[in-house]
Amino acid sequence: MGWDTDAEEVRAGLTVLAAMAVAGELTPEHTATVAEQLGVTPTEVVDAYTPEMRRLAMEEIMEQPAMAELDKALDDIARES
């Protein structure tokens, strides 16, 4: 039997696990446990959080002034092509 995802304490725990996942801190053991308790595969768990993890990483990268300048320069080159 898996977790009761309607239970408030389970939802709170899943929120913590989701934060760990997007921060890259979810271990393979955590992933396996979450998958088992939710009745999905570990790959499905990873697939669920990977887009958000990538989005946050790109935000962090683009906050760097040099990367923002490079992005603008590349956009300008692409428009000229």
Image (tube, grey):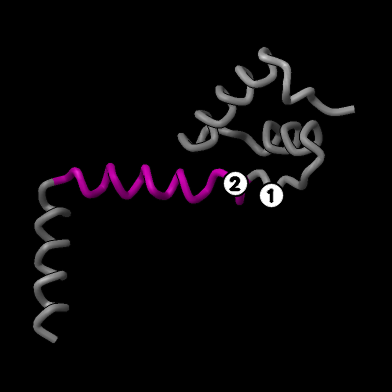
In the figure, residue 76 lies in which quadrant? Answer: bottom left
Q: Nearer the viewer, residue 17 or 8?
A: 8
Report the amino acid beneath label 2. Answer: Ala
- Asked if the stretch drawn in magenta spans residue 74, the answer is no
**Residue 10: x percent and y percent?**
69, 19
The answer to whether mark 2 and mark 1 are in CB contact below 8 A is yes
Q: Nearer the viewer, residue 23 or 40?
A: 40
In the figure, residue 49 lies in which quadrant? Answer: top right
- Asked if the stretch drawn in magenta spans residue 59, the answer is yes
Looking at the magenta stretch, what is its main secondary structure? helix
Q: Residues within 10 Å of mark 1 (few under 14, many from 20)?
A: few
In the figure, residue 71 lies in which quadrant? Answer: bottom left
| Magenta highlight range | 46-64
Image point (48%, 37%), residue name: 22
Identify the element where label 1 is drawn: helix
**Residue 62: x percent and y percent?**
22, 49
Q: Which residue is mark 2?
A: 48
Q: Residues within 10 Å of mark 2 (few under 14, many from 20)?
A: some
| Residue 44 image label | 1
Query: Is residue 2 found left or right of 66 in the rendered image?
Result: right
